[in-house]
Amino acid sequence: MGGGATSISRFCRKLGGSTVQGVPELGKIERGSYFEMWYRSHGKRALDVLSVASGLLVLAPLILGLLVVLWVFQGRPVFFSQVRMGRNFSPFRIYKFRTMKMATVDRQAGFSPGLPDRRTPLGRILRKTKLDELPQLWNVLVGDMSLVGPRPEVPDWVDTEDSRWQVALSVRPGLTDYASLAFFDEEARLQVASDPDATYRFEVLPQKLLLAQSYVNELSIRTDLRIIMRTFMRLARP
């Protein structure tokens, strides 16, 4: 845990955020100024709705184009949905463009890392560019998710009695966060692991929880804008 916290601290400093001093401290949310308190309670949601509504207008041609291409070359269903754990441990259904072969769609309800043979040719492109995540803009619009927040996990991975999860899920899950940036190549890492399931459970997930708690601790409009900017910069890299 000590080594994990050290590496997480270095990552947070690289992004310009505060360092991680330990899990207990991360649970102590710093209230800050009145504006920061307002942003946490109302402003963040307003930013989500305005940004997504505007983004959907701009991205509508791309989304419609992907719908047609996927329907023609992969057939139905075009979308993949799955139950994830949301804010305050409330489950919700997340949406993505389908990237897996139909024979394996049913098995996507569980954890399936490191299995590139399950992806369709188009699915590989969508996952590499993160375009498969575009339908989650709907999740943000209806309030299941936020633009920035800890990535939602399937219920089987969530321990409601664990204080780390209680902090991480005190906010809406998001499209991107510190962990999304730190583990941008997560699938590639898990593909070379001898036991992807164990690697995720005992190595990746604990670090994600540390990063999630760090995000909750320093949640502000500056933090959110910084993470969004870094995400676009990372997506632009080959």
Image (spheres, rainbow, N blue to C red):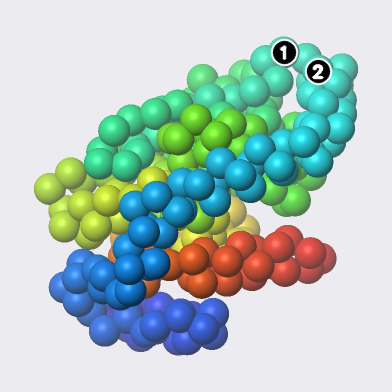
Q: Is residue 92 left or right of residue 148?
A: left
At 72% across and 13% down in the image, what residue appears? 76
Describe the element under mark 2 as helix, strand or loop. Answer: helix
**Image spot of residue 234 (x, y percent):** 70, 67
Q: Is residue 90 left or right of residue 152?
A: left
Question: Tag 2: Cα neighbours inside 10 Å, few (<14), some, or many (≥20)?
Answer: some
**Image spot of residue 170 (x, y percent):** 27, 51
**Residue identifier under label 2:** 71
User: Label 2 sits on what residue type?
Assistant: Trp
On residue 76, the disc is 1
Above/below status of 21 relative to 171: below
Q: Is residue 124 left or right of residue 31?
A: right
Quarter that holds the N terminus = bottom left
**Image spot of residue 188 (x, y percent):** 62, 58
Cα gap from disc 1 to disc 2, whole angstroms: 6 Å
Q: Nearer the viewer, residue 148 or 34?
A: 34
User: Label 1 sits on what residue type?
Assistant: Arg
Q: Nearer the viewer, residue 70 or 147?
A: 147
Above/below status of 171 relative to 109: below
Q: Nearer the viewer, residue 44 or 109?
A: 44
At 63% across and 47% down in the image, what residue appears? 51
